[in-house]
Image (cartoon, helix red, strand yellow):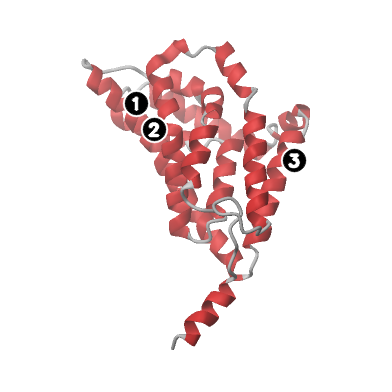
Amino acid sequence: MDVWTGFAVGLFGSLHCVGMCGPIALALPVFGETQFKIMLGRILYNLGRIVTYTVMGALFGLFGSRLVLFGLQQNLSIIFGTGILLYVLIPRKIKVQVSEFGFYKTIVSFLKTNFSRLTSKRSNSSLFTIGLLNGLLPCGFVYVGIAGATSTGNWLNGAIYMTLFGLGTFPIMFVTTVLGKVINFNLRRRINKLIPFLAVLLALLFILRGLNLGIPFISPKFIPTSVNAEAVQNCH
């Protein structure tokens, strides 16, 4: 997956952020005597999210590099795309049951506790930390980004991919933190209805990527690592 697509995925999928992370963004404390300080706090919150995404991108990009060594990069892309399609098709009832798993509930409970504690501190450092924790929230949209980072094939590209992914989500999340209650529950609910369609488009992009059709940017030809290594040896 080309790293530039990380920004596109983040930008076009950021509507999901309004629906899922909107309540957290709206609950951020407002402090500071000037508009500049208020804006700075909102920027730091979003930078915290991006830092977490970048670290996750590096870790999963490193994991993806191991798969590339075994020639599994194309298969991985198809598997991720198919997985996203299945997630969209799974009934909501089953998804709710999954969210009741002990490990999942433990993570969410831990994050909510720390959100409450940090919100009461009313400082720029606490807003940045809230952003860091926000990036760890279980989120299907972030998992799509991680899938893309894994398919980049190395830790650096994975980190860049998720950085661009986070920057893609920045505009709408920043506007959400500033506009506050203008983005109400009904609007977030309508936005959430668009998410499945966006997820299907992303899934098809992953699957096309893995099919190796030779279509520039969408399904470019994949050159196996072994071929690259052989070419290097022939140059010496």
Corner quadrant of residue 72 = bottom right
Residue 53 spot, x, y in % from top left? 46, 43
The residue at which mark 1 appears reads as 42
Residue 210 spot, x, y in % from top left? 66, 56
Mark 2: amino acid? Asn
Mark nearer the viewer, 3 or 1? 3
Residue 231 spot, x, y in % from top left? 51, 80
Which residue shows up at 66% across the image and 31% down it? 197
Horizontal placement of 132 versus 20: left or right? Answer: left
**Marks 3 and 2, how far apart at CA:** 30 Å
Residues at discs 2 and 1 in contact (Cβ within 8 Å): yes
Mark 3: amino acid? Leu
What secondary structure is marked by label 2?
helix
* On screen, residue 148 above or below 188: below
Corner quadrant of residue 83 = top right
Compare residues 94 and 210 and report the one nearer the observer: 210
**Can the viewer see residue 81 in this picture?**
yes
Mark 1: amino acid? Arg
For the residue carrying disc 2, how many other residues have a C-alpha within 10 Å: few (<14), some (14-19), or many (20+)? many
Label ID, residue 86 = 3
The residue at which mark 2 appears reads as 46
Residue 168 spot, x, y in % from top left? 45, 36
Compare residues 120 and 62 and report the one nearer the observer: 62
Of the 4 image quadrants, the one containing the C terminus is bottom left
